[in-house]
Amino acid sequence: MKGVLPGLAKSFQSTLDRFLAPENLLHIFGIILLIILVLVIARVVLALSHVFTEKLFHPQVAGQTLYIQERRAKTLKTLTLSVINYVIYFIGGVMILQLLGLNTSSLLAAAGIGGLAVGFGAQNLVRDVITGFFILFEDQFGVGDYISAGGVSGVVEEMGIRVTRIRDFGGQLHIIPNGEIKQVTNFMGKSMRVMFDVRVAYSTDVETAIQILGDLFAGAARKNPAIVEGPRVLGVQELGERGVNLRVQARTTAMEQWNVEREIKREILKRFSEAGIEIQNPQRFLLVQETKGGGGQDAGVGQDKV
């Protein structure tokens, strides 16, 4: 044990002396400078690539680009930036490994041979990338679309070759691997449908209610540019237990269907209130019956009022 410690100390001192030799320090300092230079060049190339990509997919004539072209431009821009980032990171990493003295050609060859073994573990990655390209090719959705996919709903903020980022109305950002997107519901059609029922009491004159709605809806599209078609009353939809359901339908521009529906319902409530028409809703009342001789009272069973 006494002979081992001095030997280790001597070996460490010899290695430290060689490391601190002027020629070795210059060599190491040169490698560090080259690595820093590679990182700086990579950052500059990334910045220039982002600027070039922004200009490449920017609409040339403001206000005259079709909606589908804008969607495709945004989607292709995010996808192109994602691919550029991966490529530059890979090239920069290989150059740094070469500066450190590693044989990158042998590493790449080994990676190619070991790819078959690693492939089983990378199946999900390959599936995500392939699915991402099919989503782009088939134009299932694009950046800025409001969709429901992967169990969440929201606006697509970014679409990469591996993941899609969706932000919901609550502000949460959901990052979904493309391979997990099995079914997509896109709410960004040319005209989105608004459809709901208005329930009136059986005592209401249905023809009068329909006429009031028709007068209310006349010219609604001119007042609200978000309305593409309608609104109109389709007629009696159902004779329910609690009243008569009148079906109302309209079509709006994308992402405006909820605002238009709320506005139409507000106007209907206001106009029916002015006309004295009751929008029938379930009501519960209590029947109270006196018991003979007891002087007390028994509460009857609550019932729905029609």
Image (cartoon, rainbow, N blue to C red):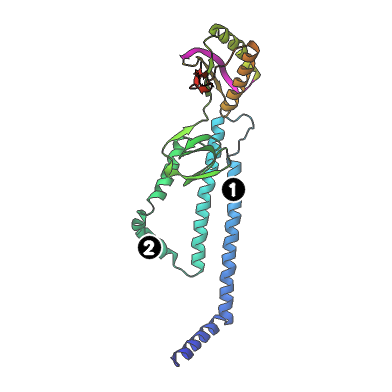
Residue 159 position within the rendered picture, expressed as x and y whole percent measured from the top left: 51, 42
Question: Of callouts 1 and 2, which one flags the residue occurring earlier in the amino acid sequence?
Answer: 1
**Disc 2, SS:** helix
Q: Tell whether position 70 is magenta.
A: no
Residue in the image at 58% along x and 14% along y: 278
The answer to whether residue 62 is above or below residue 36 is above
Position of the N terminus, as image quadrant, is bottom left
State the count of labels: 2
Residue 50, disc: 1
Which stretch did the figure color magenta? 224-240
> Which SS does the magenta portion mostly show?
strand
Q: Tell whether position 226 is magenta.
A: yes
Residue underneath mark 2: 110
Q: Calculate the distance from the C-alpha at mark 1 to the C-alpha at mark 2.
A: 33 Å
Residue in the image at 58% along x and 11% along y: 214
Residue 161 position within the rendered picture, expressed as x and y whole percent measured from the top left: 47, 46
